[in-house]
């Protein structure tokens, strides 16, 4: 009691009274001039308001005042019980008997008939306006933290049927309502409530009015938009391109990319990747997954193979190559470098079943013998390109048979075949007049065999590297007689000197490439090339110990056609003092 009667107790009571007064002065809970706020705050008593029209003069005025007083008490009672915005909104939307009394006390000029309480005919006749959600009806002053409902992002649909003439065609208010519903579609469904869910026509479709098709079938706008989007994506699909264009695109892919990538996309691409044009040229080089089973499958499905490359495929045996050769009579090119596991059987089968063969590259196969070369000479008269480097069991017997049976041969290359001698060189020079490329690197060939090459008028490239008994006179004679010679390789021949290089520079009118690595030449050879040759573009004089800065500088100044000069490991040549060699003429 002492505390309550004290000064502090008086202040506490005073503070409590102020808080109660503040609670009574509530701000508007609902946006706009809602009926509760209008009556509670006494806006009807303002001088600007018009008096309510009554039918009975003074008695009507008395009745109106009585109704207004009762409505005010009723509004205060509801205002005290409605403490939240959601409760206010549900009260307004619920069909109460007292709501008519509240509505009657509000001037008509301030509050027109709201769209929520209009009859269906009135809504259909007027311009359709989307119904606001409950959250939009709540005032922001008290409920600023309440988040609005974000509308779903759906594509806008254009409907070809106009809703303007729907009322004229007949059908009453229902047809007009359907037409108005077709014209405006809400992008977001309204929140569920007892009244709005029953009044909205899109209850099952999430607040979206279904569309009516010509055949009476109803579909939702979302499905129509998704179908339109699907049609657009299908129209822009790459599969709509002509198959010829797709085949052209796939032709730039490798076998690995087509088999392990493109063919796994869809069935259509798989069929395109199995097109016959992709399996004419089969390049399986370096793929260790390739085995006999794969070659058998290719042979069983494709009989028009024209080119096969199985270089470095260590899991391929004779059985797979024989199966492919027996099913490919039109095979033209066969390449199998470094397939040491293959024997004569594979090449013999190819020679027997592929008479149109024009190219055979089987370098570095130790098990290959003269028997296979004899069959090539007997059955493959169209052969033009042969590479038999490092096949150590091949001798003159097989080479002579090959030269006699293949008169159209244009390229022959041998490397480190010690059993091949001058007899083979003579056979090729006599029986193959169309030879353009000849190479006998490291073979047991001498100048007596090389001199027979002077009869080859179409010879353009000659590889005589590491020929143990090769003299300068033979080389000069070949250069004089073979006027079309454009490339000459004399590397690793210590007998080639400056005099030979000078004759080559003078007589080789069409010579463009000259390789002199590890030859016995000096600066004089380079100076002669710069003075006498107007066609040589590439000179490689690496590992020539006697070349100095003088020779490199002179050839760089005097030659008008030189583009490349190789001086690797020329110890007497100084890069710092020969900067003039890199300057343009």
Image: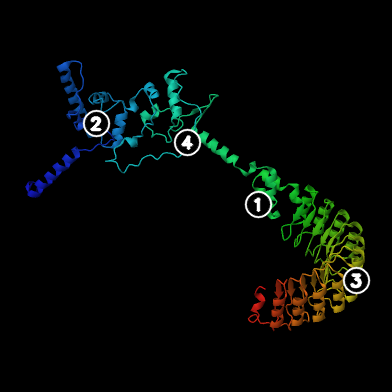
Label 3 crowd bin: few (<14), some (14–19), many (20+), radius 10 Å:
some
**CB under 8 Å between discs 2 and 3:** no
Position of 214 with respect to 47 (left or right) is right
In depth, the one of 17 and 472 nearer the eye is: 472
- CA distance for labels 2 and 3: 122 Å
- CA distance for labels 2 and 4: 39 Å
Residue 36's label in the rendered image is 2
Residue 156's label in the rendered image is 4
- Judged from the image, the secondary structure of the residue bearing numbered disc 2 is helix
As displayed, is residue 315 above or below residue 91? below
Between marks 2 and 4 in the image, the one whose residue lies nearer the viewer: 4
Residue 261's label in the rendered image is 1
Marked residue nearer the N-terminal end (4 or 3): 4
Between marks 1 and 3 in the image, the one whose residue lies nearer the viewer: 3
Please give the name of the residue rendered at 42% of the width and 20% of the height, measured from the top-left corner: 173
The image position of residue 540, as x and y in percent, is 74, 75
Task: Choose top left, top right, bottom left or bottom right for residue 188.
Answer: top left
């Amino acid at each position: 009691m002492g505390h309550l009667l004290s000064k502090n107790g008086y202040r506490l009571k005073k503070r409590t009274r102020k808080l109660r007064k503040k609670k009574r002065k509530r701000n508007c809970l609902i946006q706009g001039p809602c009926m509760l706020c209008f009556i509670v705050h006494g806006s009807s008593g303002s001088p600007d308001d018009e008096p309510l029209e009554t039918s009975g003069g003074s008695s009507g005025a008395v009745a109106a005042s009585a109704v207004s007083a009762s409505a005010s008490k009723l509004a205060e009672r509801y205002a005290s019980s409605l403490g939240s915005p959601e409760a206010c909104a549900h009260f307004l939307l619920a069909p109460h008997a007292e709501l008519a009394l509240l509505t009657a006390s509000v001037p008509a000029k301030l509050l027109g008939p709201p769209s929520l309480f209009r009859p269906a005919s009135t809504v259909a006749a007027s311009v359709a306006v989307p119904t606001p959600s409950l959250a939009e009806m709540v005032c922001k002053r008290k409920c600023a933290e309440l988040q609005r409902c974000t509308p779903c992002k759906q594509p806008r649909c254009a409907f070809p049927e106009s809703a303007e003439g729907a009322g004229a065609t007949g059908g009453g208010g229902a047809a007009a309502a359907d037409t108005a519903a077709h014209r405006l579609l809400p992008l977001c469904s309204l929140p569920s409530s007892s009244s709005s869910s029953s009044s909205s026509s899109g209850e099952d479709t999430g607040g979206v009015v279904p569309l009516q098709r010509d055949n009476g079938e109803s579909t939702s706008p979302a499905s129509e938009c998704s179908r339109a989007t699907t049609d657009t994506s299908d129209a822009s699909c790459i599969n709509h391109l002509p198959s010829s264009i797709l085949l052209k695109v796939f032709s730039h892919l490798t076998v690995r990319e087509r088999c392990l990538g493109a063919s796994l996309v869809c069935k259509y691409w798989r069929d395109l990747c199995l097109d016959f044009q992709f399996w004419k040229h089969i390049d399986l080089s370096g793929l260790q997954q390739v085995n006999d089973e794969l070659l058998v499958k290719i042979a069983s499905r494709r009989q028009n193979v024209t080119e096969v490359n199985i270089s470095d495929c260590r899991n391929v045996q004779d059985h797979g190559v024989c199966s492919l050769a027996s099913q490919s009579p039109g095979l033209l090119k066969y390449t199998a470098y470094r397939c040491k596991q293959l024997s004569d059987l594979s090449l013999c089968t190819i020679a027997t079943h592929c008479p149109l063969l024009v190219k055979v590259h089987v370098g570095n196969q130790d098990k290959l013998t003269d028997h296979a070369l004899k069959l090539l000479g007997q059955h493959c008269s169209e052969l033009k390109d042969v590479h038999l480097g490092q096949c150590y069991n091949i001798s003159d017997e097989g080479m002579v048979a090959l030269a006699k049976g293949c008169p159209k041969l244009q390229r022959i290359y041998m490397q480190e075949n010690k059993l091949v001698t001058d007899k083979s060189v003579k056979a090729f020079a006599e029986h193959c007049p169309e030879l353009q490329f000849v190479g006998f690197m490291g073979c047991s060939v001498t100048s007596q065999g090389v001199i027979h090459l002077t009869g080859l008028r179409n010879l353009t490239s000659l590889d005589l590297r590491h020929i143990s008994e090769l003299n300068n006179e033979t080389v000069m004679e070949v250069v004089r007689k073979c006027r079309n010679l454009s490339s000459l390789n004399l590397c690793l021949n210590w007998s080639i000197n400056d005099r030979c290089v000078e004759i080559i520079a003078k007589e080789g009118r069409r010579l463009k490439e000259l390789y002199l690595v590890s030859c016995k030449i000096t600066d004089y050879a380079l100076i002669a090339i710069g003075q006498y040759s107007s066609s040589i573009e590439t000179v490689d004089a690496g590992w020539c110990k006697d070349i100095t800065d003088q020779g490199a500088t002179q050839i760089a100044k005097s030659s008008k056609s030189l583009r490349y000069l190789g001086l690797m490991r020329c110890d007497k040549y100084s890069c710092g003092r020969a900067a003039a060699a890199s300057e343009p003429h």
